[in-house]
Amino acid sequence: MALYALSFAEISDYARRETFSGLDDLFTSNYAPPVSVIVPAYNEEATIADSVRSFLSLRYPLHEVVVVNDGSKDGTLEVLKEEFDLWESDQPVRLQLGTEKIRKVYASATERLIVLDKENGGKADALNAGICAARYPLVCCLDADIILEEDALIRAARPMIESGEVAAVGGIVRVANGCEVDSGRVVEVGTPRAALPNLQIVEYLRAFLAGRTGWSKLNCLLIISGAFGMFRRQDLIAAGGYARDTVGEDMEVVTRMHRSLRERNRDYRILFIPDPVAWTEVPDTLRVLRRQRDRWHRGLIDTLLRHRKMLLNPRYGTTGLLGMPYFFLFEFLGPVVELTGYVAFAAGLALGILSLEFALAFLLAAVGLGALLSISAVFLEELRLRRYPRWRDLAKLTLYGVLENFGYRQLNTLWRVLAIVSFLRKNTEWGAMERRGFDAAERKSPARKP
């Protein structure tokens, strides 16, 4: 509740300040450092051309796009060569981070585009290669199938322009299911018909607006979404880049940056801001969603154990004293406690140990609190950010904020407990993800090498 109150106050203040942001002036300012947009691509033949065009057309004073073809087995590289008039370049890549072998470097004759062709090493390996090839001081790491709003780069870069202490910035990731997409841009925001994506919209709003905003204010934000994050290149390299032996590379690299910057006695901030928007397609089947949540939780466990030295250690400031304990107790172990509680609750009722009246009152309080938190996130969105223009969409999300407590939350709890078992069994699989694509055409993205 304290985290929610902090988030609400911060977003309200952010919305007020946006009225006088002077964002248009930044587009013509000489103070905006150039940005390298890094896009790892694996078997993205069907959509890579449209994605790259949308990234090249982002509004920013000066930016380049670095696509890393991570050993694709389809025609991803051939499509890029044909669509962007690529030629083989002798541009050197200074390998300051470990990566698999880079076969060739291509440049475009018509666009600010660099394409690396390398052997398959996984997403983290591809990101490291792109960071090494980047020519500019800020790097923005994206998923190939993400949709960025036109001004997302300048909004993400603004805190870095305003203060040299800001080492990284994460923006909000929103659910594109149900939205109208045209030429790589979301032209109309809406909600889908299916229940599962709507439940995830509520979940995303709660996690980003009412969670990460608060952690950012306390300077102990442990994760910037791998779908959209901006970093100072020198700080990212100093921390060692992305870990190639984890499935939670986005959380691990941010936690390691906290650790590295603290150990170097740097004054720094790692921020989340709610305005630079990236749109993504979320799973619409339980099977795919289960694989995604299993991987997320295994990545979280791996990160916390790798950096357990930071836990309750004053040397690491609020990250060690607040962020790490919270994630250990409520994110890592919370599902075990919750599942045990459900079993004990049912057993207590069956054995007559619990009073039925008390049990029903307690259940009502628990469900009521969960619904209150979710609905609050939905209304925070409407009151301050207003991305959903239709009241019927807000009413639908409010309803799902209540319904998620009856089945969906428990299912997620079970998946996260099973993920702990999967982690103990040393499962390092990425897990195949199936997406329909923004044009609703069925396509599949094969699993990456872990």
Image: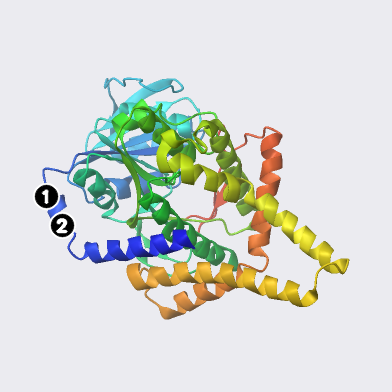
Residue 386, x across and y down, in percent = 35, 70
Q: Which mark is residue 385?
A: none
Instruction: Tell me what residue is drawn at x 27 percent, y 23 percent.
Output: 89
Q: Are marks 1 and 2 in contact (CB under 8 Å)?
A: yes
Task: Residue 335: tell me if it is visible.
Answer: yes
Kindly state the secondary structure of the residue where label 2 is placed: helix
Which residue is tagged 2? 24
In this image, 63 relative to 101: left or right? left
Instruction: Count the marks.
Output: 2
Graded by Cα atoms within 10 Å as few (under 14), some (14 to 19) or many (20 or more), the crowding at tag 2 reads few
Label 1: which residue?
28
Q: Observer-nearest residue: 429 or 46?
A: 429
| SS label for mark 1 | loop
Name the residue type under label 1. Answer: Thr
Q: Is residue 39 left or right of residue 294?
A: left
Q: In front here: 192 or 250?
A: 250
Task: Write down the quadrant of residue 237 in the picture.
Answer: top left
Q: Position of residue 310 (x, y in %)?
A: 49, 34
**178 shown above or below 325:** below
Any part of residue 446 in sight: no
Q: Residue at the front extreme? A: 314
The one nearer the camera, 23 or 58, is 23
Please state, as top left, top right, bottom left or bottom right, where the C terminus lies in the image: top right
Q: Please determine whether, in this image, residue 373 is positioned above or below residue 123.
A: below
Q: Quadrant of residue 420?
A: top right
Q: Amino acid at mark 2?
A: Asp
Q: Residue at x 29, y 53 (%)?
A: 152
